[in-house]
Image (cartoon, grey):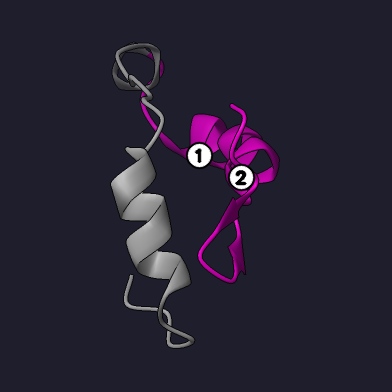
Amino acid sequence: MSYQIIGYRKNDLEECLPILKARMPQEDFEKLQFAEAPINFLKAVKSYKINQF
Protein backbone atom coordinates (compact mmCIF):
# COMPACT_ATOMS: atom_id res chain seq x y z
CA MET A 1 0.00 0.00 0.00
CA SER A 2 1.47 3.27 -1.00
CA TYR A 3 -0.32 5.70 1.34
CA GLN A 4 1.34 5.64 4.74
CA ILE A 5 -0.21 8.93 5.91
CA ILE A 6 -3.93 9.66 5.77
CA GLY A 7 -4.54 13.30 6.60
CA TYR A 8 -2.22 13.86 9.54
CA ARG A 9 -2.56 10.30 10.81
CA LYS A 10 -0.14 7.43 10.17
CA ASN A 11 -1.74 4.38 8.56
CA ASP A 12 -0.74 1.48 10.83
CA LEU A 13 -2.38 -1.19 8.67
CA GLU A 14 0.79 -3.21 8.05
CA GLU A 15 1.62 -3.31 11.78
CA CYS A 16 -1.97 -4.21 12.74
CA LEU A 17 -2.63 -7.00 10.22
CA PRO A 18 -0.82 -9.70 12.26
CA ILE A 19 -2.91 -8.78 15.32
CA LEU A 20 -6.12 -8.90 13.31
CA LYS A 21 -5.12 -12.22 11.74
CA ALA A 22 -4.51 -13.74 15.18
CA ARG A 23 -7.97 -12.75 16.40
CA MET A 24 -10.09 -13.21 13.30
CA PRO A 25 -11.30 -16.51 11.84
CA GLN A 26 -8.81 -17.47 9.12
CA GLU A 27 -11.53 -17.91 6.49
CA ASP A 28 -12.77 -14.36 7.10
CA PHE A 29 -9.27 -12.88 7.23
CA GLU A 30 -8.49 -14.41 3.84
CA LYS A 31 -11.56 -12.66 2.38
CA LEU A 32 -10.35 -9.20 3.34
CA GLN A 33 -9.80 -6.87 0.41
CA PHE A 34 -7.92 -3.59 0.35
CA ALA A 35 -8.11 -0.59 -1.93
CA GLU A 36 -6.25 2.67 -2.03
CA ALA A 37 -8.26 5.70 -1.04
CA PRO A 38 -9.23 8.06 -3.87
CA ILE A 39 -6.95 11.09 -4.14
CA ASN A 40 -9.92 13.42 -3.48
CA PHE A 41 -10.50 11.68 -0.14
CA LEU A 42 -6.83 12.00 0.81
CA LYS A 43 -6.90 15.71 -0.06
CA ALA A 44 -10.09 16.21 1.95
CA VAL A 45 -8.77 14.59 5.13
CA LYS A 46 -5.54 16.56 4.81
CA SER A 47 -7.56 19.80 4.85
CA TYR A 48 -8.65 19.24 8.49
CA LYS A 49 -6.37 19.00 11.51
CA ILE A 50 -9.01 16.96 13.39
CA ASN A 51 -9.12 13.21 12.71
CA GLN A 52 -12.67 12.42 11.60
CA PHE A 53 -12.23 8.65 11.38
What's the residue at 52%, 30% (across, down)?
21
Q: Where 13 sits versus 29, above or below?
A: below
Instruction: Tell me which residue sits at (65%, 45%) in the image.
Output: 4
Of helix, strand and loop, which one carries label 1?
helix
Secondary structure of residue under mark 2: helix
User: Looking at the rendered structure, which numbered label has been put on residue 20?
Assistant: 1
Q: Quadrant of residue 30?
A: top left
- Structural crowding at the residue carrying mark 2, measured as other residues with C-alpha within 10 Å and reported as few (<14), some (14–19) or many (≥20): few
Horizontally, is 27 left or right of 5 in the view?
left
In the rendered structure, which segment of residues is drawn in magenta?
1-26
Does 27 appear above or below 15?
A: above
Q: Residue furthest right?
A: 15
Kindly check if marks 1 and 2 are in contact, taking CB atoms under 8 A apart as contact: yes
Residue 48 point in image, percent of width and height = 41, 82
Quadrant position of the C terminus in the picture? bottom left
Badge number at residue 16: 2
Residue 10 lies in magenta, yes or no? yes
Q: Is residue 22 left or right of residue 41?
A: right
User: Can you give x and y, in whole percent of width and height, for residue 49 in the image?
Assistant: 49, 86
Q: Quadrant of residue 31?
A: top left
Q: Amino acid at mark 2?
A: Cys
